[in-house]
Amino acid sequence: MEEQASDESLMQSYAQGEAHAFQQLFARYQGRIYGFLLRRLGISQKALAEDLFQLTWLKVHQHRNDFDPSKKFSTWIFTVAQNSMFDHLKKASTRYEVEENPDLPAQDLQQMSAEGL
């Protein structure tokens, strides 16, 4: 019986250009990473979980040469997923839309801003 390659050795192989290693890692972790994101975000956020899932794998690709094979791959990829989620949520919480109403005089707009409305 053939012994299965470790996640860490697959990541090393992928960093050296072996595409099949990425395919194996993806097969092993796709459900776990998506489930992790969906549980954290909530079932109503499936589209966001899918976007962050894709972003996680993009970052795995972009930082494949930064992976330290003396560390656990599973810890690394879940940290990448979690940080992607936190970064998105942080950016989303600082965004807001300013609605302009041409019927309001500028003085009223300034007062509303000062009052935090």
Image (spheres, rainbow, N blue to C red):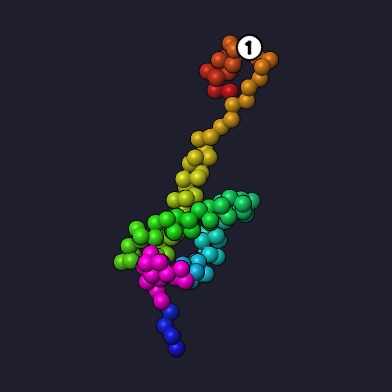
Q: Quadrant of residue 112?
A: top right
Is residue 19 part of the magenta span, yes or no?
yes
Residue shown at 52%/18% (left/top)? Answer: 114
Residue 2 lies, in percent from the top left, at 43, 85
Main SS, magenta residues: helix
Residue 19 lies, in percent from the top left, at 46, 68
Residue 16 lies, in percent from the top left, at 37, 67
Q: Which residues are magenta?
A: 5-21
Q: Amino acid at mark 1?
A: Pro
Quarter containing the N terminus: bottom left
Residue shown at 61%/51% (left/top)? Answer: 47
User: Does any portion of residue 8 appear in the rendered image?
Assistant: no
Q: Identify the element where label 1 is drawn.
A: loop
Closer to the camera in the image, 80 or 55: 55
Is residue 54 part of the magenta span, yes or no?
no
Q: Is residue 45 above or below residue 29?
A: above
Tally of numbered discs:
1
Residue 30 lies, in percent from the top left, at 53, 64
Q: Is residue 47 above or below residue 105?
A: below
Is residue 81 found left or right of 103 in the rendered image?
left
Closer to the camera in the image, 65 or 93: 65
Q: Please identify the residue farthest to the front as the structure is shown.
A: 17
Q: Residues within 10 Å of mark 1 (few under 14, many from 20)?
A: few
Residue shown at 56%/52% (left/top)? Answer: 51
Q: Please identify the residue farthest to the left as the structure is shown.
A: 70
Residue under circle 1? 105
